[in-house]
Structures are given as C-alpha cells and as structure tokens.
Image (spheres, rainbow, N blue to C red):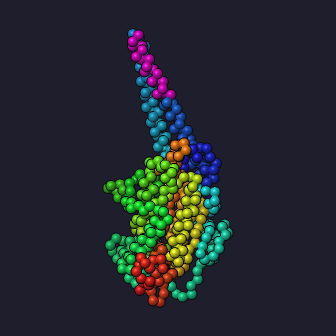
Amino acid sequence: MLTLKLITEDTERVIKGLEKKHFDGAKAAIEEVIATDKKRRQAQTELDQNLSQAKKLAAEIGLLMKQGKRDEAEEVKAKVATLKETSKNLEQQKEEAENELTRLLCQIPNIPYDNVPEGTCAEDNWVVKSNLKECVEGKDTVGNWDANPIVESARLPHWELAKKYNLIDFDLGVKITGAGFPVYRGKGARLQRALINFFLDEARAAGYEEIMPPTVVNAASGYGTGQLPDKEGQMYHCEVDDLYLIPTAEVPVTNIYRDVIIDEKDLPIKNCAYTQCFRREAGSYGKDVRGLNRLHEFSKIEIVRIDTPEHSQESHREMLAHVESLLQKLELPYRILRLCGGDQSFTSAICYDFEVWSEAQKRWLEVSSVSNFDTYQANRLKCRIRRSADKKTELAHTLNGSALALPRIVAAILENNQTESGIRVPKVLVPYMGCEVID
C-alpha cells in the first residue's frame, strides 16, 4: 500500500497518479486518509500528554503520603484515575483510527510511474516491441496494431489438435473435477514437463535461485502481496483452515521476505519457482475461455526480485529481457505491451504484458506480465533494506513476472507448429521431449 509519508508530503502527485489509473474518487479517498491520520495523530498526542501528566501526579502521591497530607494525596489519586479513564478512551480512539486508516489504505491502488501511458482499457496499451515489425512507442497501440501474422493454410485450434494427437483430455477433466481442469496425457504431459524444465533451467542460468514453496498460504501472505482483502472471490478458500490456494507463486515466494530486513549487500535477491496455480475466474465464459485459454488450475514458472529503489528499474529491464529470450527460443510470434494506467493491476507501478499469436484463433494470448511494484508490496510486507553506509532502513522494491505461464504457450506451440506430419517441437525443447515431432 502507499505510504503515509508519500500521501501527506506529495499529495497532488498521488492524486494525479490515481486519476491516471482511473481510480474513482481519488481526491476524496486521499483527503479521507489524511483526515483519518490527523485523528490518529491527535489521539496519540493527547494520549501521550495524559500519560505524562498521570506519571508526574503518581510521583506526587507518594511524597504527599510521606508528608502526612492524606487528603491532598487522595485528591491527586482521583485526578490520576480520571486521566487513566481518559487515556483508555483515547487509546480506543487511536486504535479505531489506525484500523480505519489501514482499511482506507488497502482500498487505494498503487500509483503508476510517469512513463506509464494514459488510457482507459486494453486498446490503449502501447505495443513497444515485437518480432514481427518495428514499433513506435505511443503510435502503435493495441487498437491500431496491424502486424498480425497471416498464414494462408487452414489451421486447427489447439483443442482440436489436443484431441487429434491425444495430448489433453478436457472432458476427462470435467468428469474428475469440472471445467477448467484439463488432464494432460502422453506427449501432452511430456510437453508440459519439457516446458517446466526448460523454463527452470533458463532461470537458473540467469542467476535465479529455485524455490519450491507451498501452494496454499495463510491470510497474512495474501495480504502481503495485495490479493487480500479485496480479491477473495478470485481465490479458492479452504474455509476450515482459513487457507488460500495460490493464484501465482508470487504470493508464497515474495512472502519469504515478509517482516524481514535485508542487508543492502545481499541485493538484488532473485528467486524463481514452479507451482500449480489456482484461480476461480468467476464469470468467465465464451470463446475466450475455450480449451487452454483460461483455466482454473495451471502450471507456471514465476520470477521474483527484491531490490533497492535505485536499481529496481534495471532489474525490471533484465526481467523483461529474460522473458523475451524465452519466447525467442521457442520461435513464437510475440509482442510486448506497456500497459496504460487504466489497464494496470491494482498493485503495480508499471507493467509489461507479453502476448503470443494464436494462428488458429486469430488472436493474441497473454503469456506473461512483468511488474515493478515499487514500495507498494514492501510496505504491506514490512520488507526493508538495511543500508551498508549508515545502517538505516528503508522499504525495498519488489518485482515479479511469469517466465512463463504454460497453458497459452502450449496452445501457441500446437497451433503455430502444426504440419501435415504432426506438431513440430521447437528445437530448444527437443532434448527435453526426446522427439522432434508430436504425432
């Protein structure tokens, strides 16, 4: 969440940032935060004064008793009792203001960086790079993009190819669990494993430490990365134990650093993790969710970084280059989008999406989002840096990205690599698959 220091010292910039993100009632929300913080500070000031006065008066009581001035001592005792009762009420007021302040801050999204484009929806996102054509920032938006690949031969969608080559059984998944839980089998399962191992090997080669975290987390972890308290409806909740199935490895991996002070010399921290991910995706329906397009359970490799404020933008660029290299090695047509303010996530300061072309569906499929959260998550996590020079502490920056999410990568590989003799396996996956063609 945003820090009170930022809100109170740079109020206009915060309001403008929230307006750029198209957050309704930005000015009113910030004014309410400032007013509530004023109540909290006023209660704290009066409480401190009361406690100080009560302490002085308590010292007088003993002196008066020694001097035999019992009546005066009793009068002072009565004053102390009144002060204690007042202090009790002030403590309650302060606690109520603190709780209200936290509630208000949790409802306010992160503010975007200055280089985040203006815009209200996905059509306004900038196409900043592609392996299909040169792009001009600010000119090539999703709404006017004209470089979709054109293949004259007929293409089958991945769900038909999966059935043809016995790779994925969607009906069996419905039988066992329900829609959105496919069963991978044979070479389909092997392709999944090949991609997982390839992505993990690439992350390790890039200096990421592999983590194998739990796939269920407590509410504190969900709060730390911003999934809670507002996004319960998107997560599977184990009510008896009050645990949540993770929507992404970002949640458990980033929470490793909750309530931790990290020495500056140990940064940047670079972690990667393969996990199953679970998303309810309530209300999803239609052609956009057919096959592997949108699932309730899927595999994903996540990369996470913790860094200093002055180096986090360089870390972000390195993460973007890493994800792009994966798509290049998989030989897939891709484009990179810088999301506009209105299409950014609640917690990100800047976000880039990677999309691959689905030839059979004639549409772009998102396969990764790479975000810098600035101090927004770190403030919730209480993740701090200890500076080497003066030993002072400050909030860290957190970053994360998919590297990569498997379902739509699988869909793109099947659809873009289909031939008369089968599905051509990308060269980098042949050592993992043990074959060059899926037939």
Residue drawn at point x = 62 percent, y = 46 percent: 10
In the displayed structure, 70 sits above or below 10; it is: above
The residue depicted at 47 percent of the width and 66 percent of the height is 205
Picture coordinates of residue 44, whole percent (x, y) = 50, 34
Instruction: Examine the rendered structure and indicate whether residue 242 appears above or below residue 295.
Output: above
Residue 24 image point, x, y percent:
58, 55
Q: What residue sits 32% from the left and 72% below the top?
A: 176
Q: Residue furthest top?
A: 68
Q: Whole-percent x and y of residue 221?
A: 42, 54
Q: How many marks?
A: 0
Decide whether residue 208 is among the magenta residues: no
Q: Nearer the viewer, residue 136 or 58?
A: 136
Nearest the eye: 245 or 233: 245
> Does residue 50 belong to the magenta stretch?
yes
Residue at the far bottom: name it.
Answer: 420
Can residue 76 be seen in this snapshot?
no
Helix, strand or loop: magenta stretch: helix
Q: Is residue 271 visible?
A: yes
Depth order, front residue of 131/390: 390
Residue 175: percent from left, percent from top: 33, 74
Magenta segment, which residues? 49-67
Q: Quadrant of the C terminus?
A: bottom left
Kindly indicate the quadrant of the structure image that contains residue 337: bottom right
What residue is rendered at 63% in x and 62% in y?
Answer: 117
